[in-house]
């Protein structure tokens, strides 16, 4: 039987400080080691994109992870957002997506945990990666 507390967790992280929800394509083109360094204290969950399982597998290889979490694919954008919101649970969240509904934006604003919504279709650019790194640095200072 699988231990749900460790399945899909980034190697070496016993209790994550935050969740990162993204498509694997968002990590394409990032400088070597950027995502691995970013996720030292976090947990990544992938959304299925056009690349399918092969893209998720490639991202897992890039991260040096034997296992990653894959969020279930929903039939509508509204249901997909609801799944991500439920998955975030009580942890801070970095959510990378092509776009967000007004409901998701309001949820991010109102929830008790810090939440960063990053709109990006495909690979993150340098500015977006910087915004995420700063957000995670702030989280790190709060937990020290």
Image (spheres, rainbow, N blue to C red):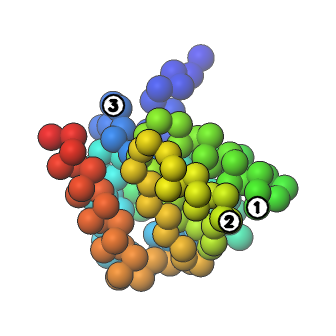
Instruction: Identify the residue at image location x=82%, y=59%.
Output: 76
In the displayed structure image, the side of residue 34 where residue 7 appears, left or right: right
Q: CA distance from mark 3 to mark 2?
A: 32 Å
The location of residue 144, given as percent across then percent down, is 15, 40
Q: Which residue is mark 3?
A: 14
Task: Name the mark on residue 50.
Answer: none
Tell me the mark number nearer the camera, choosing from 2 and 1.
2
Instruction: Give whichever of 114, 37 is nearer the camera.
Output: 114
Q: Tell me the element at label 2.
A: loop
Q: Quadrant of the N terminus?
A: top right
- In which quarter of the view is residue 129 placed? bottom left
Looking at the image, residue 121 lies above or below residue 58: below
Tell me the distance, in whole angstroms, between the alpha carbons under discs 2 and 1: 9 Å
**Residue in the picture at 62% in, 49% down:** 84
Assess whether mark 1 and mark 2 are in contact (beta carbons under 8 angstroms).
yes
First along the sequence among labels 3 and 1: 3
Q: Residues within 10 Å of mark 1 (few under 14, many from 20)?
A: few
Image-quadrant location for residue 103? bottom right
Q: Which residue is mark 2?
A: 101
Circle 3 Cα neighbour tier, 10 Å, few/some/many (<14 / 14–19 / ≥20): few
Q: Which disc is residue 77 wearing?
A: 1
Q: Is residue 32 left or right of residue 92?
A: left
């Amino acid at each position: 039987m699988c231990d749900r507390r460790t399945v899909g967790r980034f190697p070496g992280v016993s209790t994550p400080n935050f969740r990162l929800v993204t498509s694997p394509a968002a990590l394409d083109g990032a400088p070597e080691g950027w995502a691995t360094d970013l996720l030292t204290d976090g947990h990544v969950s992938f959304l299925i994109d056009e690349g399918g399982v092969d893209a998720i597998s490639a991202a897992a290889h890039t991260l040096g992870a034997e296992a990653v979490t894959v969020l279930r694919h929903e039939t509508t954008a509204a249901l997909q957002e609801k799944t991500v919101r439920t998955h975030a649970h009580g942890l801070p969240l970095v959510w990378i997506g092509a776009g967000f509904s007004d409901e998701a934006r309001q949820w991010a604003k109102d929830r008790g945990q810090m939440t960063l919504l990053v709109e990006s279709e495909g690979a993150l650019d340098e500015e977006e990666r910087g915004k995420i790194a700063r957000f995670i640095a702030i989280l790190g200072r709060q937990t020290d």
